Amino acid sequence: MIVCICNNVSDKAIRQAVGNGAHTISALREKLAVGTCCGKCHSCAKTILRDCLEDQASHPVVFQPAFAAA
């Protein structure tokens, strides 16, 4: 779904940017230019950002130590 018509930014692009470290609406604005023209997409982009961050918090990444093979 296109979230920002002015800059052709999809929800998928927003989710990918959040996965790559954009954890604020300002970071999304910088990376994707979402919400930089008319601003009508701001609330939708913010909702997607919030949902992505909640998903990340409920599925933390667990690192396993690497063991050398003998």
Image: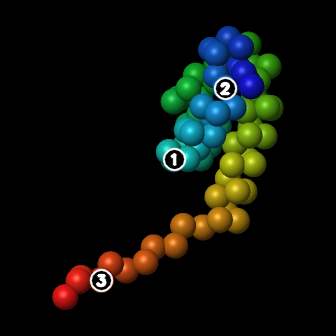
Residue drawn 67% across and 26% down?
10
Query: Which residue type carries mark 1?
Result: Gly
Q: Secondary structure at mark 2?
A: strand
Residue placed under numbered mark 1 in the picture: 21
Labels 3, 2: front one = 3
Work out how far the residue at label 2 is from the one at label 1, CA to CA, in angstroms: 17 Å
Work out how far the residue at label 3 is from the one at label 2, CA to CA, in angstroms: 41 Å
Q: Position of residue 49 (x, y in %)?
A: 69, 42
Among the 4 quarters of the image, the one containing residue 1? top right
Q: Quadrant of the C terminus?
A: bottom left
Q: Position of residue 61 (x, y in %)?
A: 54, 67
The residue positioned farthest toward the front in the image shown: 70
The residue positioned farthest toward the bottom in the image shown: 70
Marks 3 and 2: CB-CB under 8 Å? no
Query: Which residue type carries mark 2?
Result: Ser
Badge 3: how crowded within 10 Å, few (<14), some, or many (20+)?
few
Residue placed under numbered mark 2 in the picture: 10
Residue placed under numbered mark 3 in the picture: 67
Q: Is residue 22 visible?
A: yes
Q: Secondary structure at mark 3?
A: loop
Q: Earlier along the polypeptide chain: callout 1 or callout 3? A: 1
